[in-house]
Image (cartoon, helix red, strand yellow):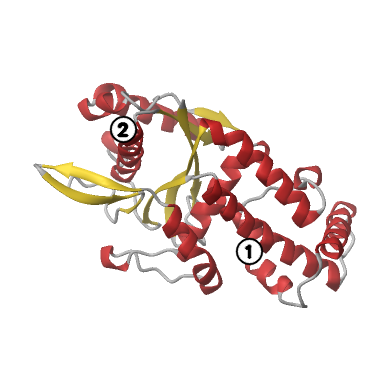
Amino acid sequence: MAWLLFLDESGHDHKQMPYEVRGGVALHAGEVWPFVQDLQRLEFDCFGTRLAEFQKELKGCKLLDRDRFRWAGQGGAMVPEERRRHCRAFLTKGLEKKPPSRQEFTAYGQACLEMARGMFHALRSRKAQLFAAAIPRDVARPATSEADEYLRKDQVFLFQRYFDFLEGKREHGLLVMDQVERAEDRRFVSRLERYFTRTETGRYRTIWIVPVPLFVSSDLTYPVQAADLAIYCLNWGSRVPSRGMDAPTRLEIADEFALWINQLQFRGEAYREGNVYPEYGIVYVPDPYTRR
């Protein structure tokens, strides 16, 4: 059997998010369909319908937007059937361009938060592993051919950790990516191919990593939406101050979801020059273009 690493990115527009993050969640092939079924049931329990029918996705920036927290706190917790009824009305009015009522806003906010919490529960119950690499959002790419043609250091570290995880399991791993913009996707695939075919380390890591990514549409793929939620929460709520990752957080996300991020991230051991040291699935790289 194999593992699938569902990848997404956060903060690449360099506007509001504190960091630029690429990462996602790895699920064993035998857990993918049960995980999808978990989220289908959860989505109906929270909203009373499939969001895709209303042209909406289960993305972190949608479920955990500041407005969702504000709406959820407008009233007491609703009983599930009442919440679902008001959510369906909220979504229907959105399509009809009609203003929802206060109760409907409250219900939708509460449903979004419950969905996010449930997605993390499902990830843990299906033994998902989190891998992510973050860099400062203001890092400028140098105008060199190397920067254009090869993977950044943070991305190499991301695949290193995935490889170490797979090697420990003695199982192969696939890469499943959100299809965003065709030209940029092609550039990334080219960099990926060069790394896995033209570098000694990259070639060695193809022992376990299948270096040909599969592209999917995130609005049709629950695990990619879960990956989006996880790295969104990492971007806003999880920090490694000892390594310089100390940008301000959104406290409502840090207070509730940072522990989930910490629990889900891969933990293993790495070896260098005869020494053993702990290795983590989340890596922060302040200087992704230097050789240091």
Q: As shown in the figure, which amino acid type bears the numbered disc 1?
A: Asp
Vertical order, 114 against 30 (above or below): below
Q: Residue at x 65, y 39 (%)?
A: 36
Q: Which residue is mark 1?
A: 65
Q: Which element is circle 2 on?
A: helix
Location of residue 1 in the rendering, given as x and y in whole percent from the top left corner: 46, 25
Q: Which residue is at the front of the view, 156 or 1? A: 1
Q: Which residue is mark 2?
A: 167
Q: Residue at x 24, y 52 (%)?
A: 278
Vertical order, 255 against 187 (above or below): below
Binning the other alpha carbons within 10 Å of mark 2 as few (below 14), some (14 to 19) or many (20 upward) gives: some
Distance between the alpha carbons at the discs numbered 1 and 2: 38 Å
Which circle's residue, 1 or 2, is located before the other in the chain?
Answer: 1
**Residue mark closest to the camera, 1 vs 2:** 2
Location of residue 23 in the rendering, given as x and y in whole percent from the top left corner: 44, 45
Vertical order, 67 against 231 (above or below): below
Q: Which element is circle 1 on?
A: loop
- The answer to which quarter of the image holds residue 100 is bottom right
Q: Which residue is at the front of the view, 74 or 169? A: 169
Vertical order, 37 against 183 (above or below): below
Residue 218: in sight, yes or no? no
Location of residue 102 in the rendering, given as x and y in whole percent from the top left corner: 84, 73
Left or right, residue 248 beside residue 240: right
Q: Which residue is at the front of the view, 185 or 31? A: 31
Q: As shown in the figure, which amino acid type bears the numbered disc 2?
A: Glu
Marks 1,2: beta carbons within 8 A: no
Q: Residue at x 83, y 59 (%)?
A: 84
